[in-house]
Amino acid sequence: MQKKIYLCFRFMYQKLLSNRMKTALKISILVLIFSSAINSSAQKYAVEIGYTNPAKRGSNFSPTYFYGGRLGGTANFELKNNFSLLTGALYSFVYSDKKIGYPNSGLVNKKTTGHFIDIPIHVLYSLPISKTLKVFGYAGPNINVGLSQNQITTSNLSAALNTFHAVEVGTKELYTASILNRLNLQIGIGGGIQWKKYQIKSGYDFGVTNLNKIDTGKLFQRGWYVSFSYEF
C-alpha cells in the first residue's frame, strides 16, 4: 500500500513540476515528511472526490463565484484521545462565467478557469457512535496553491468606454500577468460522518492572504466544499 501511495505522489510530481510549481511542491514535501515523523505506524489513507464552490471577494471588487470539482488523496496520522492529523494533496478544477452589466445594454463577460492544489494540515477529532459509525470534526490551516487561472474577457462596450471602465478585452493568465498571488493561506473548519471505510464531509476555508498584487484593494479567496472519501 505504501508503494502505491509513493507511486501516486511521484506521478503527481512529474506532471506538475515546473519553475512556478517548485515552491508549492517543496511545501507539500515538507508537510508529508512532518506527518510521517509523527507516527509512521498509525497511518490511514483515503481517496477523495467532491464538489467545490470557492469565491473571490474584496472591498473594491464584485464577487466572482467558481464552480468545480476536486480529487486527491489524504493521509490521517493518529495521535491520542481520538485526535489525529489530516493532510494530503487535492487538485481542483473550477470555472466561472461572470457577467457585468452597464447602462444602455452594455455587457462585459469574464470567463475564468482555475486549477489549484490544496494541502490541508488539519487537526481532526473523532467521536465513535458504534463499532462501524463515527462522526468527526476538524480545523486548521489549508495551503491553497494556484497552478493557473486563465481569464477571457469580452465586451460590447465602445473602445472609449472600455478604457474608462478599465476593461481589458482578451485572454490573460492572472498569475503570470502578476495580477494575483499564487499562494493563498486559509483557515479551514469542517466535519462529517464515517461508516466503515466510507466518509462524507463538508467544510469551509476562510482566505486570510491578500491575493491582489496590484494596488486596487484587498482580495481574498474562500469557499465551501463537500466530498466523499474511501479509506484504505
Image (tube, grey):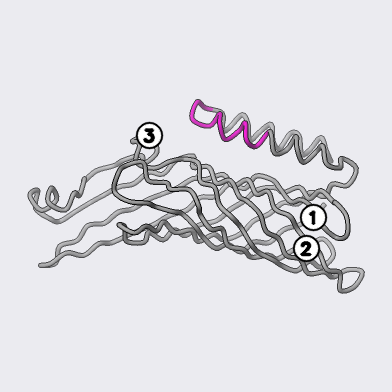
Residue 197 pos. (x, y %): 82, 60
- Secondary structure, magenta segment, majority class: helix
Tell me the residue that label 3 is attached to. 176
For the residues carrying marks 3 and 1, which lies nearer the camera in this image? 3
Question: How crowded is the residue under tag 2: few (<14 C-alpha within 10 Å), some, or many (20+)?
Answer: some
Q: Residue at x 16, y 53 (%)?
A: 165
Q: Amino acid at mark 2?
A: Tyr
Residue 24 pos. (x, y %): 57, 35
Q: Which residues are magenta?
A: 18-29
- Using the numbered discs, state the Cα–Cα distance from disc 3 to disc 1 in whole angstroms: 37 Å
Report the disc number at residue 114. Answer: none
Quadrant where the N terminus lies? top right
Report the disc number at residue 231. Answer: 1
Query: As drawn, is 157 to the left or to the right of 175?
Result: left
What is the residue that sits farthest to the bottom in this orientation? 129
Residue 168, image quadrant: top left
Q: Nearer the viewer, residue 15 or 209?
A: 209
Q: Quick check: is 153 in the magenta stretch?
A: no
Q: Amino acid at mark 3?
A: Thr
- Secondary structure type for disc 3: loop
Q: Amino acid at mark 1?
A: Glu
Tell me the residue that label 2 is attached to. 198
- Secondary structure type for disc 1: strand
In the rendered image of this protein, does residue 138 appear above or below residue 27? below
In the rendered image of this protein, does residue 7 appear above or below residue 103? above
Q: Earlier in the sequence, mark 3 or mark 1?
A: 3
Decide: marks 2, 1 in contact (CB < 8 A)? yes
Question: How crowded is the residue under tag 3: few (<14 C-alpha within 10 Å), some, or many (20+)?
Answer: some
Q: Earlier in the sequence, mark 3 or mark 2?
A: 3
Residue 221 pos. (x, y %): 46, 54
Q: Residue at x 78, y 63 (%)?
A: 198
